[in-house]
């Protein structure tokens, strides 16, 4: 499978990318991140040369909830558990990151401070890792208890989705609400029948990674810490993708940016601003020219070897 | 480079504009004309705000209601001219409302600052407004052509047995409103005033568009006899909870749960919000209490607020004596320049003692509609947070 990830499509580039990497054949599309606007696909279809095959995963999900009320109740409860887990993790994260920043700003001997900062960072990484483990366990318990795949309504939709994906030359995943995207991609097990070519942008690209990190330094509420949200579908490895980085992150705040880069290392934090295109190799190496957050907090470029 | 201003000139600071004008020679009408043409009034230089008035008068005062400052501050006449001035030091981010009082030949009048086009409106009229260094009107409070507008429905008439009258309620439906969705409900006291003076519709449109706030339905309530209905009136509380709420939840696709209901009010409207929640502690999940008129006494009855505050004081005293949890969360804010700052600070601890989660914000502002408008992003993103951190288009 080859993945091409793109920056936000306010000024679309997906038409040129599609013409380049998948010149012919149907292209299955996921626009579930747009939620209730999922079916507003006229413009997207035009950009894909009239070759789009909408999977309508958001509508299918709502249909499942409507027709399987027992499952709907269970899913709501599952979501509430995940939300609670997230809220508790964020409380702990807030304290851990404040401790880290305060430690980094202390005076004294640099080598002593540096060791303390490393320890504080390790505590943050531990929290991130434990949170992902808890989320994974919660998903596993839910799947074991409710076996979504074997429920008739869900199974019918999975079969239909598989039928649409099988002949597709590519899968295109648009941005939007990353939580919804991730949920429906998992629910309909898209990763199991993914075509050879995947093109995704913004939230769609984030969902493809191993771990989804939410970020917004200017969040309308709270301290604006970046937080681990969930495991992604892991079709793309070794990266944390940051669409709209320049709009959502204080890229001049080297301390915060440095913590971001070091927190998720060895994964690379990749800046996915407007116009960016990255053709990712299956081996996980980054293309020359990729913009990533460096350990010192600056934004650097991957050089050729 | 940031210039440092100081009334006492040093080698590293710059004199205030008014002091530079004083040194002009000749200091005549033409010099004043040029000076006024060059400066926005009030002149904001670092923390110093120079208020000006030009005219033949016997005395001129700056009139404002900043707690800690005299209500009337005498302006000085610039020798040899008809220009009057006074310099106030205002903390960064301050926004104050004021007027000019002019005395001439045994006659005096209060007017808005003729040299300052910025005015703030309220049901009592308009006043001039000074933006100190660091204050800017939030961009989300101004019309945004990119924001998809919600719909403000014509007034709904709700007959109320509790209040013995028909009540007019305006309804706000968010952009892309769908009957199949489920929306939280925000009940706003003094609704028409919030729409008119606090740009409530623009604010809702923008905050929802920016994903700061979840798409919500808002109901704008309007009092008939405000000082009576909003001063801990059982009839008002009954109307809101037993008559209006069931009607709205029957007619609209609302969440219909405690967490999906919020009461909002400012000043007496905050008292009305608290009083309604107090009478139905299981109904409302959140409160937004802006500059609440939570006047109380620790001993005796001399609260200083006059008879209209008597029922409020009685209610707040009772609540403080036996506080109870009336919602899960409360956003509480007050301007530090208003007399209500002390009661509001005191109430934070009272609310927290009940187990309610409290988000308390102080603003460098007075008891004004634009202060309350400016708090909306913090308040509404707290009670009904939008999906901002999840959405990457």
Image (cartoon, coloured by chain):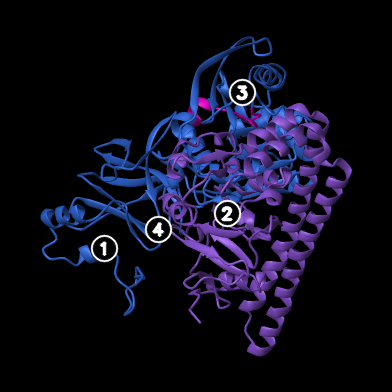
Chain colours: A purple, B blue
User: Disc 4 or 1, which lies upstream in sequence?
Assistant: 1
Q: Nearer the viewer, residue B55 or B164?
A: B164
| Mark 3 vs mark 1, CA separation in Å | 59 Å
Any part of residue A125 in sight = yes
Query: Residues in magenta?
Result: B181-194
Task: Please state which of the two labelled residues, at mark 1 or mark 2, is closer to the viewer.
Answer: 2
Q: Residue at x 21, y 63 (%)?
A: B21
Q: Give the left or right position of residue B265, taking residue B353 as reference.
A: left
Task: Please state which of the two labelled residues, at mark 3 or mark 1, is closer to the viewer.
Answer: 3
Q: Which residue is mark 2?
A: A198
Q: Position of residue B132 (x, y in %)?
A: 40, 55
Q: Chain of mark 4?
A: B
Q: Reply yes or no: does residue A46 show up in magenta.
A: no
Q: Position of residue B41 (x, y in %)?
A: 29, 51
User: Disc 3 or 1, which lies upstream in sequence?
Assistant: 1
User: Dot 3, crowdedness within 10 Å: few (<14), some or many (≥20)?
Assistant: few
Q: Chain of mark 1?
A: B
Element on which disc 4 rests: loop
User: Dot 2, crowdedness within 10 Å: few (<14), some or many (≥20)?
Assistant: many
Q: Chain of mark 2?
A: A
Q: Which residue is mark 1?
A: B17
Element on which disc 1 rests: helix
Q: Which residue is mark 4?
A: B133
The reply to whether the C-beta atoms of the residues labelled 3 and 1 are less than 8 Å apart is: no
Element on which disc 2 rests: strand
């Amino acid at each position: 499978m080859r993945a091409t990830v793109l920056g936000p499509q306010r000024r679309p580039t997906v038409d040129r990318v599609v013409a380049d990497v998948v010149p012919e054949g149907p292209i299955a599309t996921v626009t579930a991140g747009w939620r209730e606007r999922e079916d507003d696909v006229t413009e997207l279809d035009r950009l894909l040369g009239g070759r789009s095959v909408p999977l309508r995963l958001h509508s299918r999900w709502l249909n499942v909830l409507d027709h399987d009320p027992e499952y709907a109740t269970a899913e709501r409860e599952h979501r509430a558990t995940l939300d609670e887990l997230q809220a508790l993790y964020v409380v702990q994260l807030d304290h851990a990151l404040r401790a880290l920043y305060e430690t980094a700003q202390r005076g004294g001997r640099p080598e002593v401070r540096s060791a303390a900062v490393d320890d504080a960072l390790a505590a943050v990484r531990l929290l991130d890792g434990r949170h992902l483990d808890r989320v994974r366990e919660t998903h596993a318990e839910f799947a074991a208890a409710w076996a979504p795949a074997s429920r008739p309504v869900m199974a019918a939709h999975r079969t239909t989705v598989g039928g649409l994906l099988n002949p597709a030359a590519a899968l295109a995943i648009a941005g939007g609400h990353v939580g919804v995207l991730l949920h429906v991609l998992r629910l309909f097990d898209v990763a199991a029948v993914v075509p050879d070519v995947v093109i995704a942008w913004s939230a769609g690209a984030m969902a493809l990674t191993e771990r989804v990190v939410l970020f917004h330094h200017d969040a309308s509420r709270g301290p604006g810490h970046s937080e681990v949200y969930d495991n992604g579908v892991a079709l793309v490895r070794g990266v944390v993708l940051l669409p709209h980085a320049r709009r959502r992150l204080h890229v001049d705040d080297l301390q915060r940016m440095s913590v971001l880069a070091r927190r998720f290392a060895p994964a690379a934090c990749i800046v996915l601003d407007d116009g960016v295109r990255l053709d990712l190799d299956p081996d996980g190496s980054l293309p020359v020219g990729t913009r990533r957050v460096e350990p010192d907090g600056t934004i650097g470029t991957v050089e050729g070897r | 480079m940031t210039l440092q201003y100081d009334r006492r000139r040093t080698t590293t600071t710059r004199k205030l504009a008014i002091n530079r004008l004083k040194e002009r020679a000749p200091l005549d009408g033409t010099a004043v004309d040029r000076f006024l043409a060059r400066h926005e009034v009030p002149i904001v230089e670092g923390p110093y705000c120079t208020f000006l008035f030009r005219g033949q008068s016997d005395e001129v005062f700056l009139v404002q209601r900043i707690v800690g400052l005299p209500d009337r501050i005498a302006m000085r006449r610039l020798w040899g001219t008809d220009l009057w001035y006074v310099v106030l030091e205002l903390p960064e981010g301050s926004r104050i409302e004021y007027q000019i009082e002019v005395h001439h030949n045994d006659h005096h009048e209060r007017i808005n600052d003729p040299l300052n086009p910025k005015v703030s409106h309220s049901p009592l009229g308009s006043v001039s407004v000074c933006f100190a260094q660091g204050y800017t009107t939030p961009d989300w409070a101004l019309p945004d052509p990119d924001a998809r507008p919600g719909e403000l429905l014509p007034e709904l008439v709700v007959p109320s047995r509790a209040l013995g009258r028909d009540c007019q309620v305006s309804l706000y439906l968010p952009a892309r409103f769908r009957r199949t969705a489920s929306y939280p409900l925000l009940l706003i006291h003094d609704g028409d005033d919030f729409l008119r003076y606090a740009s409530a519709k623009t604010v809702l449109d923008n905050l929802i568009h920016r994903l700061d706030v979840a798409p919500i339905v808002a109901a704008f309530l309007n009092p008939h006899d405000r000082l009576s209905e909003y001063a801990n009136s059982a009839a008002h509380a009954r109307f809101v909870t037993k008559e209006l709420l069931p009607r709205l939840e029957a007619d609209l696709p609302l969440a219909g749960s405690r967490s999906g209901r919020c009461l909002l009010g400012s000043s007496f409207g905050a008292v009305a919000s608290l009083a309604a929640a107090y009478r139905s502690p299981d109904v409302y999940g959140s409160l937004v209490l802006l500059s609440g008129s939570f006047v109380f006494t620790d001993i005796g009855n001399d609260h200083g607020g006059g008879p209209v505050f008597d029922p409020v004081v009685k209610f707040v005293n009772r609540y403080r004596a036996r506080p109870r949890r009336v919602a899960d969360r409360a956003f509480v804010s007050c301007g530090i320049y208003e007399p209500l700052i002390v009661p509001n600070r005191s109430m934070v601890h009272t609310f927290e003692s009940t187990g309610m989660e409290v988000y308390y914000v102080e603003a460098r502002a007075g008891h004004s509609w634009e202060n309350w408008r400016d708090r909306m992003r913090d308040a509404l993103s707290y009670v009904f947070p939008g999906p901002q951190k999840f959405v990457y288009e």
